[in-house]
Amino acid sequence: MFDINNYLSEKKDLVDRALQQYFPPDHPFFGVMYYSLDTGKRIRPILTLASFEALGGRNLDVIMPIACGLELIHTYSLIHDDLPAMDNDDYRRGKPTAHKQFGEALAILSGDGLYAYAFELFSRGSNLIDERYRVIQTVSEAVGPKGIVYGQVLDIEEHKTADPKTLRKIHLNKTAKFICAPIKCGAIMARASDRTLAVLEKAGIYLGILFQYTDDILDVVGEKDRLGKTPGKDESAGKLTAPRVYGLSGARFRARRFAELAQGLFSSLGDQFVIFNRITDFVLNRSF
Ligand code: GRG
């Protein structure tokens, strides 16, 4: 019987092994960069592998540098998000944040290094050049000023009122675009049609909004000290979160609705996308 937890754990192991290969211990700064990369659910690279495989992609050598590059960018964003000038967090992924471990300067540089190294990985390989170009275009849009950087700018503003439209803008830019982009990257590398990419674009955004809903909900009701995060920190810092705008049960209701919207679209792409419905269920019900 198919078990989503086994699936995620097998894919995570593959990603973890590939990441280790990209960070050989002989480089003097790779250890610092790898410190922050060392744990995590690996959801973004798994989404890339899943869409690549759903569309018939088989060659891991083609997709792994791209999947792992996305994890590098995600990790850079976490390191910078944790800095004193931003969220000022002491723990991330169950251990002291990079700036607590190495000081601010090296933390900033390790984020910068991960970000640039990701693009080196995206451009590795002498085949599928047009597809690689589209991957770079897709990722840079999702993580730049039209994506997570803008989301972060909105997120660190003080929000005196619980405005649903602003919440939607934060969720879309801070999180959803960079959940959607990995799905699209896998599809691009498998040479998906424009029609499939258009459906994945919408489904990926719904899945990404759902991802941030469950993150906001877990901030309120998650296990104490979830991987080092202080429960309720976001709400008490005046952040705009789904439970603050809609209440806990309203946020849960809407999360289920976003899951259904994503699943309807994934289902429309055929049986090979059923894995995305299981991943969506996992995101909806996750406890970490
Ligand atoms: C610094 C440009 C810049 C952006 C930061 C990533 C981010 C934007 C802020 C971190 C806080 C946050 C809640 C971001 C939304 C995305 C998100 C839910 C990140 C956590 O991702 P997971 O759950 O983490 O995939 P792991 O550790 O499992 O990889």
Image (cartoon, rainbow, N blue to C red):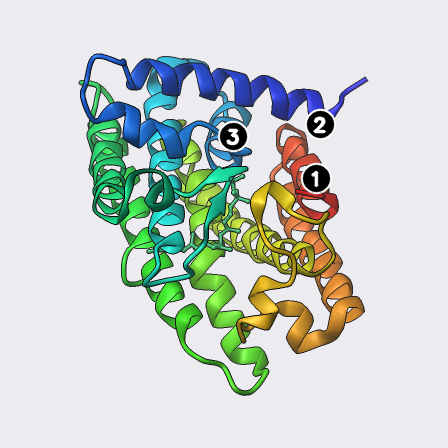
Q: Is residue 88 above or below residue 126?
A: below
Mark 3: secondary structure? helix
Instruction: Please state which of residues 22 and 229 is positioned toward the viewer in this rendering.
Output: 229
User: Is there any visible trace of residue 191 in the rendered image?
Assistant: no
Marks 2 and 3 in Cβ contact (< 8 Å): no
Mark 2: secondary structure? helix
Residue at the disc numbered 1: 282
Residue at the disc numbered 3: 46
Tag of residue 95: none
Residue at the disc numbered 2: 4
x 40%, y 13%: residue: 59
Of all residues shown, which one is farthest toward the bottom?
Answer: 161
Instruction: Please state which of residues 200 and 89 is positioned toward the viewer in this rendering.
Output: 89
Indicate left or right for 257 with 61 as reference.
right
**Residue 21: image location, x then y, percent:** 33, 13
The image quarter containing residue 68 is top left
Q: Is residue 226 above or below residue 6?
A: below
Q: CA distance from mark 2 to mark 3?
A: 12 Å
User: Is there any visible trace of residue 127 in the rendered image?
Assistant: yes
Q: Mark 2: few, some, or many residues within 10 Å (few <14, many ≥20)?
A: some
Image quarter in which the N terminus is found: top right
- Three-letter amino acid code at the position of disc 2: Ile
Is ligand 1 within 8 Å of the beta carbon of the residue shown at mark 3? no
Mark 1: secondary structure? helix
